[in-house]
Each structure stands twice: as structure tokens, then as C-alpha cells.
Image: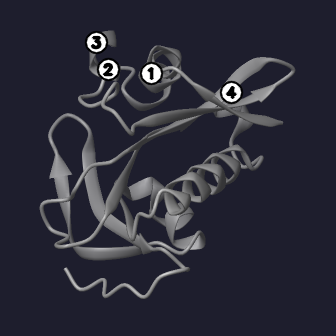
Amino acid sequence: MEIKQISAEETQDIRHRVLRPEQPESNAIYPNDDLEGTFHLGAFENDVLLGVASFYPEKSAVIMNHAQYRIRGVATERRMRLKGLGTALLAEGEAKIWARGAEIIWCNARIVAVGFYEKHGYRKVGKSFVIPSIGEHYLMTKSNPNKTVDQDC
């Protein structure tokens, strides 16, 4: 498996099929996909794209006074689940984000993904909430292990 930087456009097919199959394909295009500082990673095996993740220099409305990055659109082909692609994408993204000086990474994690993020050191903040037409989520955060960060939100 190889993790490579990809374009926003390259993320959209997997995002649509895995995360939003019942919605229009245009819903797989996210705001800030092309924002300066945003980057997208792909997990490849034999030059076939099997997983994607996007990382945005975006502040949460709940987390105050920290340099932040947001994770969004983490998706792997169903047949490749539990084979380490998500972990590899997350690890590579985190390394790049910490190198850029971010203090906190956050995401709105679907209920089914909470365990994945907890396994990688993220913690739930507050109560669950519903994103219409997608489902129940938790805000989850992780502090830069190389910095002292007060995560109180």
C-alpha cells in the first residue's frame, strides 16, 4: 500500500459511493476542498485508489484559540475495510498536520467511526448531534503530542 497526495477531484468518486450514495454526486464536493492549506491523501494498491481522506485548515466553532485542522471525507472501499488503509491515511495526514504546527485536529465522526478515532487517540467532545441526511455524529479531537494543549472546549 502507498499513501500519496491527490487532488480534491480524485476523492469524489469514493466519497460519493461510500459516504453519500443516496445523495447527488455533487454532494461529494466539499466546501474548502481547494482552500490554501487543504490537502487530500489517497491509499493505493497496485496504482488503484482504494481510500481517501481530506484535511482542512478549518476552525471548529466549539474549539477556541488553537491552530486547528479538520479531517473530513475519510472513506475506503468496502472490500478493503479493516486492512489498515484508514489508519495509514490518518497517520500520514496527522504527520503533515503536526509538521505544519497545528495544535488540534478535529472531525465530526459518524457514530460508526467513533471507535476508529478513539483507537487513534481522539476523544469525544460534548453530546452527539445529527447532521441532516447523513446521521448522528460526535465532535472528536486530538491534541498534537509534541505540544502542550488545553483541549477544554
Q: CA distance from mark 4 to mark 2?
A: 18 Å
State the CA–CA distance, disc 1 to disc 4. Answer: 15 Å
Looking at the rendered structure, the kind of residue marked 1 is Ala
Dot 2 and dot 3 residues touching (CB under 8 Å): yes
The part of the image, by quadrant, that contains residue 30 is top left
Disc 1: which residue: 8
* Mark 4 secondary-structure assignment: strand
In the image, taking residue 101 as reference, residue 32 lies left or right, namely left
Q: Earlier in the sequence, mark 4 or mark 2?
A: 2
Residue 29 numbered tag: 2
Label 2 close to label 1 by CB (< 8 Å): yes
SS of the residue under disc 3: helix
Q: Which label's residue is closer to the chain start, 3 or 4?
A: 3
x%, y% of residue 114?
Answer: 45, 63
Decide if residue 126 is on the left or right side of residue 107. Answer: left
Residue of label 4: 50
Q: Residue at x 45, y 14 (%)?
A: 9
Q: Which residue is mark 3?
A: 26
Up/down of 115 relative to 79, above or below = below
